[in-house]
Amino acid sequence: MGRLVPAVTRALDILELFLDGDGTLSAPDIVRKLQLPRTTVHELVTTLAARQYIVPVTGQPGRYRLGVRPYQLGSRYAEQLDLAAEGQQVARSVAETCDETVHVAILEATDVIYIAKVDSTHAVRMVSAAGRRLPAHCTSVGKMLLASLPEPELALRVPDGTELAAMTPNSITDPGALRETLAEIRQRGIAVENRESNPDVSCVAAPVRDRTGQVVAALSISVPMIRWSEDRRDELEQLAAKGAAELSERLGHRSVA
């Protein structure tokens, strides 16, 4: 591995400062935050401004904001992202941690489509495949995605008075009951499926967000009931949330502390 270049590191440190606060900084702000010499900061700021990475703030002499160049780089990065490929990598990492089946899924109408999957190594495990389609209301990923919809859109997809299809005796078939469940999911930020799509499997799921903050997918961990317990559910919920956050970060999402 090559040597890090101090000047480049400092320039990147300056750019990353703009991610916090109101997005504007002065040279004295940078000196104070990074504890760098004023001369060094002046040279770096001048260079970054010359390359349009930062630009002066109109009406605020001495203050800068991010310029067009970081936006162009970010847009090119976003164009190259492949949700399925990124999801497969994160799913593999999560599966290696818990040794259970991990899925990433998206919502299409009232169904979920699995776009990434990594199997458990156990002999007893969930049988599924990438590309499989299931009713959203019967799965943890689907309920997570439905809970993320605006109410008017949810009402169009799941109108009152319709009976939802059941995959097991535990499936939710009443739209009113589903809405109550979705409200709980919104509050917790985690969805749980209790043998609703498979009588022998329970799942937990967490939301995946893109760079705009919109939920675009969900990541789930599926566990056969012989390895399921309430204590383990808590552990898996945390792991699913961590995996979903990592995938969101890969998609450009930046969580606000």
Image (spheres, rainbow, N blue to C red):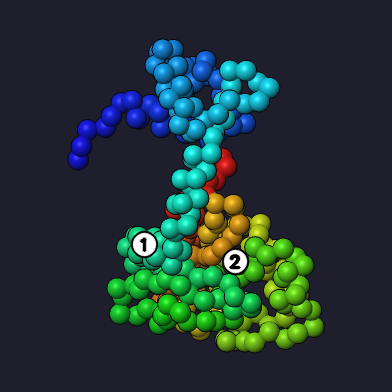
Q: Callout 1, which amino acid?
A: Gln
Left or right of 7 in this view: 209: right
Q: Is residue 30 above or below residue 189?
A: above
From this view, report whether residue 97 is shown above or below residue 255.
below
* Image coordinates for residue 31, horizontal then vertical, percent: 47, 17
Q: How far apart are the alpha carbons under marks 2 and 1?
A: 21 Å
* Image location of residue 47, percent across then percent down: 43, 25
Label 2 SS = helix
**In this orientation, does residue 245 appear?**
no
The quadrant the C terminus occupies is: top right
Residue 238, horizontal then vertical, whole percent: 48, 56
Which residue is labeled 2 in the image?
Answer: 144
Label 2 Cα crowd, 10 Å radius (few <14 / some 14-19 / many 20+)? many
The residue shown at (55%, 76%) is 112
Confirm whether residue 7 shows in the render: yes
Q: Earlier in the sequence, mark 2 or mark 1?
A: 1
Residue carrying label 1 = 89
Q: Amino acid at mark 2?
A: Met
Mark 2 or 1, closer to the camera: 1
Q: Quadrant of residue 103?
A: bottom left
Circle 1 crowding by C-alpha within 10 Å: few under 14, some 14–19, many from 20: some
Percent x, y of residue 86: 41, 61
Helix, strand or loop at label 1? It is helix
- Which residue is rendered at x = 36% and y = 71% of the image? 118
Side of 121 where 64 appears, left or right:
right
Nearer the observer, 100 or 132 = 132
